[in-house]
Amino acid sequence: MGWMKDETGLEKRAANHVALTPLSHLIRASRIFTDRPALVDRGYRATYGELHARTTRLASALAKRGVNPGDVVAAVMPNTAPHVEAHWGVPACGAVLNSINIRLDIGTISYILDHGEAKVVLVDTQFLGVVEEAIHAQESEDLPLIVEVPDEAAGYHASGRHLTYGGLLAEGDPEFAWIMPIDEWESLALNYTSGTTGRPKGVVYHHRGAYLITMGTPISWRMTLYPRYLTIVPLFHCNNWCHVWTMPAVGGATVCCRDITAKTIYDAIADEGVTHFGGAPIVLNMLVNAKEADRRDFDHVVEVFTAGAPPAPATLAKIETMGFNITQVYGLTETYGPATECTFKDGDWDHLQGDDRADVKARQGVPMPNMDHITVMEPETMTQIPMDGAALGEIMMRGNSVMKGYYKNPRATNEAFAGGYFHTGDIAKQHPDTYVQIADRAKDIIISGGENVSSVEVEGVLMHHPAVLLSAVVAKPDEKWGEVPCAFVELKEGAAATEEEIIAFVRQRLAGFKTPKHVVFQELPKTSTGKIQKFELRKIATAL
């Protein structure tokens, strides 16, 4: 086919091919939505013109401080305006943003900063002590520069020990030219998974994937121009599911939510006109069970993406009568957040009520528009399982919003991409209409309040207790958190320990959400080869 050959003059040119990047959204918004609201953080307000100016100063200041394209800039901050600004300013100087989970323990934060080789770390004052200890624990001589980000409105005042965020911005040039990617495959963000073996893996995003999910999200979420989006999903979770990068494309306002309570959510909906937010089912439970004094009336429908675990049918039935429309989505850190959506089938599902309606809405669904192919396969043969709503297989994904790979871990990357698909590790069934529904989670990951907890990591800590002979950790259903870790402990002969002692022992070594909420002392059931039968323990935990 001669017309496809390069000699026809149809090659890529500057006029017809530009690297895809979400940075282009803010540049465009600063020109056409200049005076429209872009960012709200309690009493703080910024237009798109102002947001662009501040992020330009941030990019310039980082560059002046020696941050070069490809370097990593870390952030340990809650959902505040500076964290949103970092999502633009860090990549605008060509650097890679590494937003770190604020709930992690010192050892894990130290590992991430060392593994990611962060040059600078932006730290909210609330978490300054933890980060200082994490950096002190590093063996490297090339330690990151700490930039302290005080939050006066929350009562966190500057310590005086470090350069402040305001001081850093003052160093920036408002005329700084953004360093845009030459190749859309260039790295944009580095996000660490909770891991299944204790050590988290660094997931690398590229500009192309982030741009395309910002195009797919408004379609899936029924967004028109000027939405008002509330950041309940942490900015360290898949970069807020990439929603913060989406808002300028549709001229939307990002409303920050530092402390996630029923009152702050209801206030944001009533006072700021919030139209969209995402969150784990625990957020839905919080709203349903809110005290009357914390509730507010509003006269519009709020579109909600929920993920992490299917919401309980009772919760779903209640919240959908309160002005919220819930859409179940599913994804992983490796897929920039949501990759599938349970698109509601108008006409076919309209008549469903109660548990029947909740059952179909709790499916993980079908690919979002920015993904190519998502299905359930037999992992050994990479063949499609029967779509009968009963057969089980592993969810496999292929598409533009799949990670580049695991940072400094080619072996894990190759395993994850074997056969031309990303292997999620999640076990599911598939219905005749192609909708995917998770049946179980591989590798015993516990999802507690939207956070991934590695049972292997918790078991490893338990085994350090002098009285513990064997341990196993499984998920126990919990009304508030969805799931919580439940520890089964077999003690050494003649040894003794209490539930409180075991929980305190783990709490000293791991983040609070990873700490078992229940401890059961018993001989652990094992196979003839000595393997612990976790399926038996799950039955016990569920009945507790």
Image (cartoon, grey):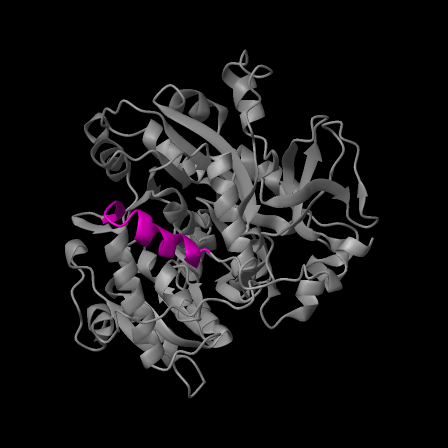
Does 479 sit left or right of 358 as displayed?
left
Q: In this view, does 243 lie above or below 127?
A: above
What residue occupies the far front of the structure in this picture? 8
**Residue 239 versus residue 354: which sits nearer the camera?**
239
Q: Is residue 523 visible?
A: no
Q: Is 28 colored magenta in this rendering?
A: yes
Q: Is 156 colored magenta in this rendering?
A: no
Q: In this view, does 296 lie above or below 7?
A: above
Residue at image x 50%, y 45%?
215
Q: Give the range drawn in magenta.
A: 22-40
Residue at image x 46%, y 57%?
497
**Residue 489 versus residue 231: which sits nearer the camera?**
231
What residue occupies the far bottom of the structure in this picture? 141
Q: Is residue 108 above or below residue 451?
A: below
Residue at image x 45%, y 36%?
305
**Residue 393 versus residue 512: which sits nearer the camera?**
393
